[in-house]
Amino acid sequence: MRTFESVEELLDFAIGEEEAAANFYKHLAGKMERPWMRDVFEQFSKEEEGHRAKLLKVKSGELPSLPKEKVLDLKIGDYLVDAELNADMDYQQALILAMKKEKAAFRMYSDLASVAESAGVRDVLLSLSQEEAKHKLRFEVEYDDIILKEN
């Protein structure tokens, strides 16, 4: 794992990751032909922008109140082959890619929390890891409802 010299450096890294995630979902939304699919990915882009805003507040010294819930993991994404972003990907491939991205984001925040020295920052990072787990769960439920039930 990368070593961070300060909490500010750790937060800057996480903020950059959220910007990248928001852009990823916005880009993915633009590739979807069906309006409802486009809406799903646009919503996720906005949620990632919300994570970025939360991290910016933490960086400015403001610690938000955090939920203390654990999120169920269906582990569907753990058993799927990787998909890459391409112009003609179908909904199944897009869901697989999104699940993999959310799993990576969950791990990133969990790892960052494990090295955070400030209890407040650690709590925010753990909260964000749970939000990313919720995102993955939403994609897994969608995959289960749409893809697995068709097969």
Image (cartoon, rainbow, N blue to C red):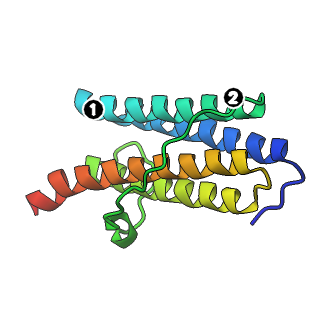
Numbered marks: total: 2
Residue 23 in view here: no
Is residue 1 shown left or right of residue 72? right
Q: Is residue 139 above or below residue 80?
A: above
Label 2 Cα neighbours within 10 Å, binned few <14 / some 14-19 / many ≥20 = few
Q: Which badge, 1 or 2, comes first in the chain's sequence?
A: 1
What percent of the width, then of the height, locates residue 84? 45, 55
Residue at image coords 35%, 59%: 72
Kind of residue at badge 2: Lys
Task: Identify which residue, 12 or 123, lies in the foreground.
Answer: 123
Q: Which residue is mark 1?
A: 33
Q: Position of residue 26 (x, y in %)?
A: 47, 31
Q: Looking at numbered disc 1 in the image, what kind of residue is underneath it?
A: Glu
Instruction: Please tell me the numbered disc located at residue 50.
Output: none
> Dot 2 corresponds to which residue?
57
Q: Position of residue 81 (x, y in %)?
A: 38, 69
| SS class, disc 2 | helix
Instruction: Using the image as rendered, state which of residue 6 and residue 18 is in the foreground.
Output: 6
Q: Are marks 1 and 2 in contact (CB under 8 Å)?
A: no
Residue 138 in view in this figure: yes
